Image: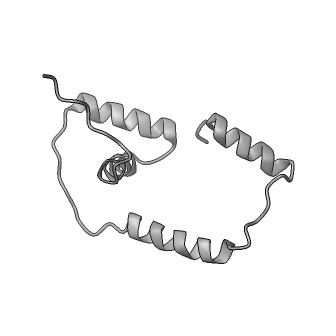
Amino acid sequence: MARLTQEEREIVKAFEQGDLRSSRHTPAIMTQHREYAAATFRKDKRVNVRISSRDLDALRKRALSEGIPYQTLIASVLHRFVEGRLRAPEAPE
């Protein structure tokens, strides 16, 4: 199991103490998020990318520590980038 972040530990603690309550909009929210997930994880295209073996080894180690396949990690990073949740490094002047 991957290590939990501080926020995740707080959520687990709140759950175990019974402090969490269901939302009255849960069915609608769940349906909406299932649709988001289906659209996000629909993989209908293949790409081939050449990267250094050093970077690939680092990606594999990182994925192993996260408990996910390395190709899933790569797809996740690319998805976050195109969604604007991950920024490219600034170009030097």
Where's the C terminus, which quadrant? top left
Q: Residue at x 23, y 66 (%)?
A: 45
Instruction: Determine whether 83 is above or below 13 in the image.
Output: below
Q: Position of residue 66 (x, y in %)?
A: 50, 40
Q: Residue at x 66, y 77 (%)?
A: 27
Left of 4 or right of it: where is 67? left
Instruction: Determine whether 58 is above or below 39 in the image.
Output: above
Using the rendered view, name the quadrant where residue 47 is placed.
bottom left
In the orientation shown, which residue stands out farthest toward the front?
A: 93
Where's the N terminus, which quadrant? top right
Q: How many marks?
A: 0
Left of 3 or right of it: where is 82? left
In the orientation shown, which residue stands out farthest toward the top?
A: 93
Q: Position of residue 69 (x, y in %)?
A: 42, 48
Left of 48 or right of it: where is 58? right
Left of 30 or right of it: where is 87? left
Instruction: Determine whether 81 is above or below 53 in the image.
Output: below
Q: Residue at x 46, y 38 (%)?
A: 64
Q: Position of residue 28 (x, y in %)?
A: 61, 77
Q: Position of residue 16 (x, y in %)?
A: 83, 49
